[in-house]
């Protein structure tokens, strides 16, 4: 059975439907004949043709990425989205889809359809496609020729050589009315612009007949960057000649066939065609003694008309068109005059630009300096030096058991604040907090117990590897900030206790339900790198090497490049759902650590592994939502669509360090991702220096106190921002000093 990859072509601006259709919102994305947009109707019509083996493909402009994703999600359709950096007409767009398809299954048939056509009878359409696919599978390039209902100057025509599926004699341009009547008499068909062709056939035809197009697209695909379901073509695409598929291939090829079809079809190319669909009226309107009129009113506007015949009234928020429907093709003349007299009305007013990385970073520094650091060092720390586990969003303290890891994290945050130049009372915060930790959290053997009651009574004596990692990490930060070298002996003692428990693979067994896990090792690696950076003893480098080797040989799946969470005692993947769990935030966090490690060791292979982890993490950032989700499965399916705060900071950190370690387009892409991640983080932060933690799939937040544990992630993201902006010599890097 032939595999079909339907391809929806989303180019074109539809200027004859001004003022509703404009470059930022072309006609295919507007509901013109019903409640759904033409693009959505097209996607619903062709998606099922992909079957189980094929895949729906959308080719559109990069500027319309979010609209494409949003509208697909609204109708529950998934697709691979190929984005053009700029429009280069249909031959380049079709070449991109054909080469992309050929890379997956060369003999698959591409069904190229326009995104803005009105075809009410989807069943008749699909029946015609079945006949065309059979011919395409044999190497023909089939186009659908609509049997005309009347002579029309709005369409191009096709001259067939016979009845039924036949070879093409000629393609002709839009004729004048008299010529159109002759074409109808001679059996010509309307050129629908739909093409059915095997992917390898079209790729070869373009290579033979439009080689400059084929080469530019090939280079653009090699340069392409993937972001979830979207593939953005590289700048090489911009060098493709701007030529339609008719001129580039169809008028030259010996493979062209045309299949006559009789289903209702319109390209809705002008307001009279929209009116003829019978479903074009939109918005509030009152017609008095008026007939044959089309009225479209934007939200908040009432249109009243009296005594009109065959008139179109189209109202947008910044422009109004009133036209005799018989002359609606002349709207293009109005558009040409606007280019000179009022170019600002050629498109809708632009939405405010998203906040830049530099602006977001400067705002974050101010927020840290003026709000977060002050509130967590006052309301967030008690008189005895202990840190609160949570604060209510109105600043109230809430009595709750206090975890050892939170105490260590907060110590690291304030020691790091001192290193970053914060002039607040970080020294006293750290001194009292460290005293409290030693007094209440350290067991006689030097390890930290897990949990205390709000009053300071031990509740859980377990010594978690995770918690000891944060103790070592906090001591490294305090040592660096206060120049107290004696703290390394304290950290080394904990290290020695841990290393004694390591197994033959260098792994350490964690307490609790998941004894063999990657997460605790991740924070041990972070602590080891912190001491190594402070010129600590060689034991820290040895620990880092040990953990990285375990990660690269056991934690990271060799095939997918993704990092698993849970394992068996021999560090093979855990069985069942535990072994399939992928957390996007941890992909980013490990990517950041491996990139740091690779940079310090001058190890390109470690950096390469970091990049694969980064790409794995990006698969957990749905483009529409713009935030990293909590959990996925190895096959890419979503396990938990909620989005906590901390994965956003790890997305940011990984993007920043990989921007530093790359150049050119890849660096720019990483910096763009960093800007996205920082904007995502800002969705969680409150002006008072607190934060919300758990975002639901609908974008709302769970109403709960701010967990102190998040501050460690936020501080790490801030530090990486400051460091990367200095390394890459951002002009205003001083603006993010604390």
Image (cartoon, rainbow, N blue to C red):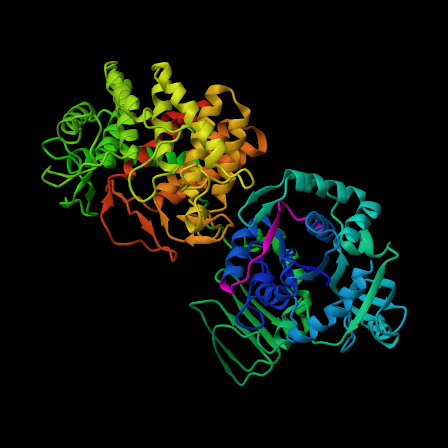
Estimate the x, y position of residue 610 in percent, counting from the top left: 49, 32
Q: Quadrant of the N terminus?
A: bottom right
Q: Relative to 218, is 94 above or below?
A: below
Which residue shows up at 62% across the image and 66% down it?
A: 48
In the image as oriented, which residue stretches furthest toward the bottom? 289
Total numbered badges shown on the rendered structure:
0
Q: Relative to 665, is 394 above or below?
A: below
Locate residue 323: give its quadrant: bottom right
Highlighted magenta segment, given as a residue range: 74-89
Estimate the x, y position of residue 444 in percent, counting from the top left: 16, 26
Which residue shows up at 13% across the image and 45% down it?
A: 399
Q: Is residue 295 visible?
A: yes
Q: Is residue 421 visible?
A: no
Q: In the depicted view, which residue is nearer to us: 404 or 554?
A: 554
Estimate the x, y position of residue 127 in percent, counting from the top left: 71, 73
Locate residue 558: give its quadrant: top right
Which residue shows up at 60% across the image and 76% down it?
A: 311
């Amino acid at each position: 059975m032939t595999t079909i990859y339907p391809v929806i072509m989303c180019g074109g601006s539809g200027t004859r439907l001004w003022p509703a259709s404009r470059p930022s919102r072309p006609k295919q994305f507007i509901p013109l004949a019903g409640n759904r947009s033409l693009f959505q109707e097209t996607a619903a019509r062709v998606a099922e043709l992909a079957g189980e083996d094929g895949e729906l493909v959308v080719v559109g402009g990069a500027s319309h990425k979010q609209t494409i994703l949003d509208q697909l999600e609204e109708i529950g359709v998934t697709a691979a989205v190929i984005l053009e950096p700029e429009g280069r007409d249909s031959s380049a767009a079709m070449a991109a889809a054909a080469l992309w398809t050929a890379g997956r299954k060369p003999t698959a048939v591409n069904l190229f359809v326009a995104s803005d056509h009105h075809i009410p009878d989807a069943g008749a359409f699909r029946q015609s496609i079945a006949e065309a696919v059979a011919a395409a599978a044999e190497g023909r390039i089939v186009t659908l020729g609509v049997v005309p209902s009347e002579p029309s100057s709005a369409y191009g025509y096709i001259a067939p050589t016979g009845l039924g599926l036949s070879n093409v004699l000629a393609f002709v341009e839009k004729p004048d009315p008299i010529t159109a009547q002759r074409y109808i008499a001679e059996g010509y068909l309307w050129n629908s612009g739909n093409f059915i062709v095997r992917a390898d056939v079209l790729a070869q035809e373009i290579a033979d007949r439009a080689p400059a197009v084929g080469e530019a697209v090939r280079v653009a695909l090699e340069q392409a960057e993937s972001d979830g379901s979207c593939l953005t073509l590289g700048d090489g695409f911009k060098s493709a000649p701007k030529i339609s598929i008719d001129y580039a291939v169809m008028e030259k090829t010996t493979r062209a066939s045309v299949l006559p079809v009789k289903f209702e079809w319109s390209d809705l190319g002008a307001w009279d065609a929209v009116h003829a669909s019978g479903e074009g009226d939109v918005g509030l309107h009152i017609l008095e003694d008026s007939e044959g009129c089309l009225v479209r009113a934007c939200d908040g506007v009432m249109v009243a008309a009296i005594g009109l015949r065959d008139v179109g009234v189209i109202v947008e928020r910044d422009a109004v068109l009133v036209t005799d429907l018989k002359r609606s093709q002349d709207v293009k003349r109005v558009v040409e005059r606007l280019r000179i007299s009022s170019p600002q009305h050629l498109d809708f007013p632009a939405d405010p630009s998203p906040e830049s990385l530099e602006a977001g970073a400067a705002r974050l520094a101010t927020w840290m300096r003026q709000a977060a650091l002050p509130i967590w060092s006052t309301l967030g720390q008690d008189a005895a030096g202990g840190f609160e586990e949570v604060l209510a969003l109105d600043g109230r303290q809430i009595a709750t058991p206090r975890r050892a890891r939170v105490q260590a994290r907060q110590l690291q945050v304030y020691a790091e604040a001192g290193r970053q130049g914060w002039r607040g009372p970080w020294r006293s915060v750290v001194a009292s907090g460290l005293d409290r930790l030693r007094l209440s959290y350290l067991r006689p053997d030097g390890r930290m117990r897990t949990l205390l009651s709000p009053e300071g009574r031990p509740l859980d004596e377990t010594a978690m590897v995770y918690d000891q990692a944060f103790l070592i990490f906090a001591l490294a930060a305090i040592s660096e900030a206060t120049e107290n070298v004696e703290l390394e002996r304290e950290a080394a003692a904990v290290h020695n206790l841990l290393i004694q428990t390591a197994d033959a693979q260098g792994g350490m067994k964690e307490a609790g339900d998941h004894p063999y896990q990657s997460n605790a090792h991740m924070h041990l690696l972070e602590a080891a790198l912190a001491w190594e950076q402070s010129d600590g003893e060689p034991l820290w480098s040895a620990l880092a090497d040990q953990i990285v080797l375990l990660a690269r040989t056991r934690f990271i799946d060799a095939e997918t490049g993704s990092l698993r969470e849970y394992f068996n005692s021999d560090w093979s993947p855990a069985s069942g759902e535990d072994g399939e769990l992928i957390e996007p935030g941890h992909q980013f966090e490990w990517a950041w650590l491996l990139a740091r490690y690779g940079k310090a060791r001058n190890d390109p292979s470690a950096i390469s592994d970091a990049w694969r982890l980064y790409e794995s993490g990006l698969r957990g950032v749905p483009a529409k939502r713009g935030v990293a989700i909590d959990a996925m499965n190895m096959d890419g399916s979503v396990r938990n669509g909620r989005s906590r705060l901390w994965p956003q900071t790890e997305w940011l950190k990984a993007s920043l360090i990989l921007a530093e370690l790359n150049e050119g387009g890849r660096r720019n892409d990483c910096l763009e991702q960093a800007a996205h991640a920082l904007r995502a983080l800002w969705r969680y932060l409150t002006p008072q220096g607190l934060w919300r933690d758990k975002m639901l799939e609908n974008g709302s937040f769970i109403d709960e106190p701010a967990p102190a544990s998040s501050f460690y992630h936020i501080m790490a993201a801030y530090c990486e921002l400051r460091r990367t902006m200095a390394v890459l010599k951002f002009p205003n890097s001083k603006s993010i000093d604390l």
